[in-house]
Image (spheres, helix red, strand yellow):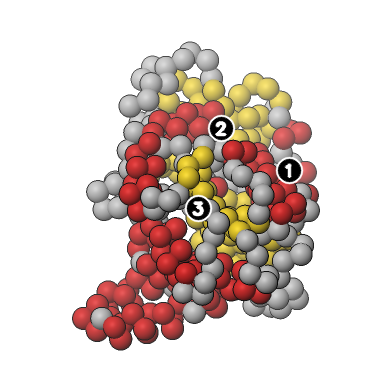
Amino acid sequence: MLQIASARAMTVADYMAAANAHYYATRDPLGAAGDFTTAPEISQMFGEMVGVWIADLWLRAGKPAFRYIELGPGRGTLALDALRAMARFGAMPQGIHLIETSPALRAAQAARIPAAVHHADIADLPADVAPIIVANEFFDALPIHQYVRTAKGWRERVVVRDQDTLAAAAGDTPAAEAVPPALRHQPVGTIVETAPAAAAIMQGCAFRLSRHGGALLAIDYGYSGPAAGDTLQAVKAHRFADPFAQPGEADLTAHVDFAALAFAARNAGALVAGPVGQGDWLRRLGIDARLTALAAAAPDRADELTGQRDRLVEPAAMGDLFKVMAIHASGWPRPEGFAEPGDSA
């Protein structure tokens, strides 16, 4: 277990960064034997719909040269399924680039996609042709800052040690300027989160799109802010856990503010589509037709496949909580799967 034993307080962001760095560096957290399961591990249909989305965009953009880039690609399952679907339409990337720091996950990705090139940071990516970037459950694991309204004003939340226990508490430094203006007049006890690390990565990706063309697809659980609330959570063995109980031994995440990501992208000159619910997006891309084809090819798996589809699409499962947003260069067509501007859907 990661030892966080200092007497001084550390911000929630620093704590989350340290805990997740240790967590991902020391294990493969995915699957039944791990701590959580992502959409690509639930069904091949998820990655295939991402591949169809990329192929459609590439075709309508005039079949330009592009690179496939994935941020936090897990075991490489999504990339493998997406690339297979893309190949059916002739959408062959000039290179496959994976942003990953975990040695365990890099090994799993290399086994599935031997041609992939690994990078630790988006700054290391080649900047020659258009990138098409996929970020599925990536932004939720980036560190967040938390601010709490106290009787003395806004303070950043910090992690403190009380004997053998870690807990979050209000720090001493005034922090009103760090709180979005729309949320500064909340009552005492209110918690507000910001994610500057996520915004910086989004802005860096959007700058690349503005210069070279291309698009980014972000899929995560979250909301369109500004909104108040404590969303920091830990998952271990597929159950929620205390985020401060075992540093580095559970997956720490927070809900993604898609409005903040969109703001960062627009500031870098990119265009934004969405967010929309994952269920709506998958239906628009044709997941039901794909389910029908797979079930016809393997009738004995029809119920299993239908259950997979429902878990991805239905509102009571992942369909509403998970959101999909696309960022694209101004010279590229509007991506598929999103309601047109002005539509009520």
In the orientation shown, which residue stands out farthest toward the top? 7
At label 2, the amino acid type is Ala
Badge 2: residue crowd in 10 Å (few <14, some 14–19, many ≥20):
many
Q: Secondary structure at mark 3?
A: strand
In the orientation shown, which residue stands out farthest toward the left? 300
For the N terminus, the quadrant is: top left
At 38% from the left edge and 57% from the top edge, which residue is drawn?
Answer: 77
Residue 172 pos. (x, y %): 64, 21
Which of label 1 and label 2 is nearer to you? 2
Q: Are marks 1 and 2 in contact (CB under 8 Å)?
A: no
Left or right placement of residue 213 versus residue 57 in this view: right
Q: Secondary structure at mark 2?
A: helix
Badge 1: residue crowd in 10 Å (few <14, some 14–19, many ≥20):
some
Front in this rendered view, residue 206 or 191:
206
Residue 257 pos. (x, y %): 62, 51
- Residue bearing the label numbered 3: 96
- Quadrant of the rendered structure where residue 198 is? top right
At label 3, the amino acid type is Ile
- Residue bearing the label numbered 1: 180
Residue 103: mark in rendering: none
Camera sees residue 185:
no
